[in-house]
Image (cartoon, rainbow, N blue to C red):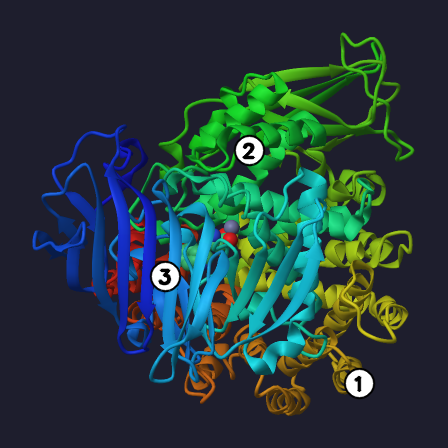
Amino acid sequence: STVIRRADYTPPAFLIDSVALEFDLAPARTIVRNTMRVRRNPDAAPAPHLELLGEALEVLGARLDGAPHGAVRAHEHGLTVENVPEAFELTLESACAPDQNTTLSGLYVSSGNFFTQCEAEGFRRITYFLDRPDVMASYTVTLRADKAAYPVLLSNGNLVDSGDLPDGRHFAQWEDPFRKPSYLFALVAGKLVAIEEQITTGSGKEKLLQVWVEPADLDKTRHAMDSLIHSIRWDEQRFGLKLDLDRFMIVAVGDFNMGAMENKGLNIFNTKYVLANPETATDTDFANIESVVGHEYFHNWTGNRVTCRDWFQLSLKEGLTVFRDQEFSADMAAGDDVASTARAVKRIEDVRVLRQLQFAEDAGPMAHPVRPESYVEINNFYTMTVYEKGSEVVRMYQTLFGRDGFRKGMDLYFKRHDGQAVTCDDFRHAMADANGRDLAQFERWYSQAGTPRVSVRTAYDAAARRYTVTLAQGYGDASPAARETQQGPLLIPFAIGLIGRDGRDLPLRLDGEAAASGTTRVLDITDTEQTFTFVDVPEQPLPSLLRNFSSPVIVEYDYSDDDLAFLLAHDSDPFNRWEAGQRLATRALLTLAARAAANEPLTLGENFIAAFRRVLTDANLSPAFRELALTLPSETYLADQMAEADPAAVHRARQFVRRQLATALRADWLAAYEQHQTPGAYEPTPEASGRRALKNLALAYLAELDDPADAVRVASAQYDASNNMTDRAAALGALLSAAAAGANEPAEHALDDFYRRFEKEALVIDKWFAMQAAQRGTPAQPTLAKVRKLLAHPAFNLKNPNRARSLIFSFCAANPAQFHAADGSGYAFWAEQVLALDAINPQVAARLARSLELWRRFTPALRDRMRDALEQVAAGAKSRDVREIVEKALA
Ligand code: HT7
Ligand code: ZN
């Protein structure tokens, strides 16, 4: 397979200034006429021919400057156009088959309507083109289709003309006033309806906002529209960035490979990130919609106005835009209060995702730098590293320079690069120049893979009242993929506080400073090992390390259990309070997992239970924070921390602790359940969703009791009475847990009711599949048997990515204890499904293929079975997407 390398970048030999696209839309055969103004690029080496990229297209004709041009040659990767002059007009006519396109890349049909997905390389499946992000052109698009079947015809930019045509057809013509790369092209055609809002921007301009959906979904669009309006206001206020089009559209589609797509002025979204009303969507869905709507809207500047030179720079737009959406959600939850716990709750949620998924990626065969050096299939590099670690890298600029300094860097970036296709280096230089700082060393965050470790040693000299903190950085035993990228120490902004015996922060004064200032300081680590000395320290403090997770590293420090309990009770940094609880729990759970693996009896200390009780009953802590602090680290995260991952042992240990906490705190859980009801109309505010989260966590713990009668009674009542999906789904989840303790009938009854109630709501039926796939199994009723039965359910459809994810991915990625069954049955199922998906949708198949990439980290018996399954897939997979994943895993 061909490896594409960053070092091989060369500018395009030709540029395309303008594109006029005409579509005659029909599901079986769509005809595309593409007229381009092309010229040779004065900054590139001369090329003999124009090489256009194309895939799954049938060429129908070519004209050069108006005359038929015979010197065109179609081949596996596209079209070679020979004998071309310096500058010319080229018209190509081609055909594609949207209703046969199950890849959901290019032009495809979903529920009878037309949609496109062009990022990263889908435009070449629509027409022959220089399909690369550094070729930016002006687009005019004419859509023609049957008017009754496709009454709505949308594309990027402004509608400039429309009307009827003979034979019941009609047309619409769209013009995008901004030059753009081909990956931002979009069209939508079909039977859709919209809610609309007219808004006036800060500069007094009128804008039309629309959210387009299928008619039955119109009652689920309000939240997406509100989120869009909030996003527009936030970007104006926080970054001075205005909506630059007269019209901004969001369209929802049920078949979509990812979350959403930021096409200029015509964002296309997975229905999952648009549709919500209280009956169908959970608090998490509401929050995700706000964040994804924000994310795609923010791309209008970070991605569209300034785009990527090549796909190695993907994090330039994705890392930055994830950072922006995280800040948006935090500001929406917390307003201007920088110290609010709502802000910390958002930070904890984001860090939890990073640590569980990105740290794992960085420890395996797919480890790559934020700016990768090579790839086989670019779709495989829309990763946690590019997105989430990329966002942490951007966040570090803000930690180093403050909000104002970060804003100065952003302003300079847009001043320099608006309308250009640029690199991660350009962004770093803008940050450095705007803040007068040399950021050469910071480049390593973009080029080194693996998760850095900072090990900390401290010493207190009571006589001298000096406290030294020695910080050493390294990568531990990084994976081979990560090791080969590592060149030297990073610049790590390391936030620290010192806590006195009374639990209060001590004022901080570093050696050499005239006076103390502040209680949290950001230390810049630049060397492999560095010592910082605090002076005037009146007593031996307890250090609070890496406050607010100021850089994406692992901190190693020898806290005692008592230290951690103290931090959990007192740290003024809410992130580190949570972190202390997680460390305490991780330590206890890993000890128990080792005992479980050795078939030794399990016990849990009183101190652990007491620390949990203190959090649960501390009314000064927000319910949302308590819910996070009382949620144990996930089985996957715990297994990743073991020298040899043993999912069965982790499951036994974690279930044991859940049961112990359920039993010991039974009365407290019941009280918390009663105290955190949210009577009245449903509201997805952080406050109300925090109360629901804690109440439903209490219910989940109660469902772990040996006698599940209380939980079944409470959950059944909640299931019947709830006026919102958060509570109904939580109640169903509790009943499914109780089923594992023998209470089968109530769970079956609720599952049937849930299905009947929501049969017509695809996104809710996805939840129905997902909950069953993630259900705990028993030896008599393994979850896989249920999952196989559900594969044959009439509502299951492998071609729909949301449905495939809800059943297959939920089992393979969200149910480790069942997936990693000792007999290898989970792996055999995985191999079957990867191969089945490979023939339909390689992008989705490749995502599933990644479930086994950490196979070398497991116990020997599992490892052997995983390798067999990987080899089976390697032998049968056809797509470049899946092959890259399994070949890297096996290498
Ligand atoms: N920029 C978008 C990426 C995306 C995508 C990539 C590959 C294949 C399908 C895709 N759909 C959307 C999403 C985003 O980050 O905003
Ligand atoms: Zn994005």
Q: Is the CB of mark 3 within 8 Å of ligand 1?
A: yes
Answer above or below: position of 681 versus 131.
below
Residue at screen point 25% across, 43% down: 38
Residue 781 lies, in percent from the top left, at 52, 83
The amino acid type found where label 2 is placed reads: Phe
Residue 204 lies, in percent from the top left, at 71, 48
Front label number (2 vs 3): 2
Answer above or below: position of 280 versus 562.
below
Query: Is residue 19 in sight in this rendering?
Result: yes
Q: Nearer the viewer, residue 13 or 137?
A: 137
Name the mark on residue 426: none
Do the residues bearing badges 2 and 3 touch, measured as CB atoms within 8 Å? Answer: no
Q: Label 3 belongs to which residue?
A: 843
Residue 706 lies, in percent from the top left, at 72, 77
Marks 3 and 1, Cα distance to the nearest angstrom? Answer: 41 Å
Name the mark on residue 414: 2
Residue found farthest to the left: 70
Q: Nearer the viewer, residue 763 or 664?
A: 763
Secondary structure category for the residue under label 3 = helix
